[in-house]
Structures are given as C-alpha cells and as structure tokens.
C-alpha cells in the first residue's frame, strides 16, 4: 500500500536540494511543535509541546533515507494510582521515502517493505506519520509511576501506598443474605421482649 502525505503538514520537509544523486545528504536539527494524536488514552505527547529532531536525510538509489532520533516530552497519569507522569522520551527513526516512479515491488516478492511505503512527493517528505508511529509504539501500554506502585483501593479509592495493610471485609453474598435474615429475627425478638416487659409491669 503506497502512503501519500499531506503537503500542508508542518512536518513536510523539502528534499529538492538532495536531488537524485545517491550519497548526497544533509542533517536536520530542529525544535518543532508536536502535532496532535501523539499518544494513547493515559499517556502521550501534548500538542504544541517541544519536539527535538536530530535527523539525517540521505539520497539513495530508491529515494530518501531518513534516520536519527526524535525527543519528546511525555505526560500522562499512572494507570494504578492516577498520579501524574512526566518524562523525556527519545526514539529511533529510520524510514525510506521512495521516489515517485520507483516501484518497490520491483525489488522482489520477499521485500517486506513493499507492503507499505511512503513517497517523496513534489520534492518533499512528510515526517509526521513516521514520527507518530515511532513515538506511539514506544509508549507503555499500561503506564505506571513506578513498577511497584500499589495503586488505589478498588472499594474506597484510598492510596494503598499510605496504608499497606488496608483492606475491606468481603462477605460471600449468600452469607450476607443470611446475616440480613438473622438481623431481622433478632430485631423481632427484641421487640417482643420489650412488649412482654411492658405488659408485666
């Protein structure tokens, strides 16, 4: 599947200066605002936050090879105790953007990269989907503030870190029903006793 990119994306980078001369290269060292949707439900990169790019753009026979690192500020909340999480994340980036007119299928049926490719379009490449894939796949599926976080009590929401011995008595619902009947019987017996005492007096 050939991936087309958005020419209006702020991360659409011109590569016209690289031409189609294999071996030609330049570096890209910039701070850019992070686009939206760089994350998951509990953790991710806030839109507009600083994203540092340290990339190398190199012209090869098939297209433009992009490699290097991207560093972002990750924020979110712990999936156990809901405390805030914040840290820097650096991810490796490596992607080949094929020249227009170059068919990756020509490289043979064993080329796995032929299944999904990005293109150099109008002498530019769009780094946004590449960076998004690199960042999102590096985020934890279940973020925690620390590995041994004890989380919250599911019954009352108390932080278990503050009271390690905290617990609630859990009754079997069948016994709870019997306890209710026993309580009702006891109340009726007490009422009868009080009534008998008043009559005797």
Image (tube, rainbow, N blue to C red):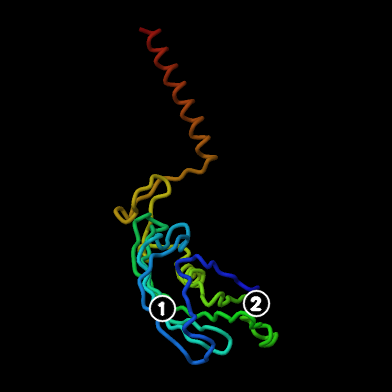
Residue furthest to the bottom in view is 23
Image location of residue 28, percent across then percent down: 40, 79
What residue appears at the point 35 percent right and 48 percent down from the top-left corner?
158
* Nearer the observer, 63 or 162: 63
Callout 1 secondary element:
strand
Residue 124 as seen in the image, left or right of residue 45: right
Residue furthest to the right in view is 109
What residue appears at the point 58 percent right and 81 percent down from the top-left corner?
98
Label 2: how many Cα within 10 Å (few below 14, some 14–19, many 20+): few
What residue appears at the point 50 percent right and 37 percent down from the top-left corner?
176
201 is higher (above) or lower (below) than 28 = above
* Nearer the observer, 151 or 105: 105
Task: For the N terminus, give its image quadrant.
Answer: bottom right
Q: Which residue is mark 2?
A: 115
**Residue 27, quarter of the rendered image:** bottom left
Image location of residue 33, percent across then percent down: 38, 65
* Nearer the observer, 134 or 41: 134
Q: Which residue is mark 1?
A: 69
Count the marks: 2
What residue appears at the point 45 percent right and 45 percent down from the top-left corner?
170
Residue furthest to the left in view is 162
24 is higher (above) or lower (below) than 4 = below
Image location of residue 75, percent across then percent down: 37, 61
Label 1: how many Cα within 10 Å (few below 14, some 14–19, many 20+): some
152 is higher (above) or lower (below) than 199 = below
Q: CA distance from mark 2 to mark 1?
A: 24 Å
Callout 2 secondary element:
helix
Residue 189's label in the rendered image is none
141 is higher (above) or lower (below) than 65 = above
């Amino acid at each position: 599947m050939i991936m087309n990119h958005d020419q209006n994306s702020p991360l659409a980078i011109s590569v016209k200066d690289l031409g189609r001369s294999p071996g030609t290269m330049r570096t890209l060292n910039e701070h850019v605002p992070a686009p939206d949707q760089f994350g998951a439900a509990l953790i991710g990169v806030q839109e507009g936050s600083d994203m540092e790019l340290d990339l190398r753009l190199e012209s090869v026979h098939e297209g433009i090879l992009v490699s290097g690192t991207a560093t972002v500020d990750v924020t979110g909340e712990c999936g156990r105790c809901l405390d805030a999480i914040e840290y820097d994340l650096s991810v490796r980036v490596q992607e080949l953007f094929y020249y227009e007119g170059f068919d990756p299928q020509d490289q043979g049926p064993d080329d796995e990269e032929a299944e999904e490719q990005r293109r150099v379009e109008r002498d530019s490449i769009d780094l946004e989907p590449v960076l998004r894939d690199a960042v999102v796949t590096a985020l934890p599926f279940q973020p925690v503030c620390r590995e041994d976080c004890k989380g919250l009590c599911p019954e009352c929401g108390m932080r278990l870190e503050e009271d390690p011995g905290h617990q609630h008595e859990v009754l079997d619902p069948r016994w709870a029903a019997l306890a209710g009947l026993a309580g009702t019987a006891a109340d009726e017996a007490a009422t009868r006793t009080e009534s008998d005492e008043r009559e005797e007096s």
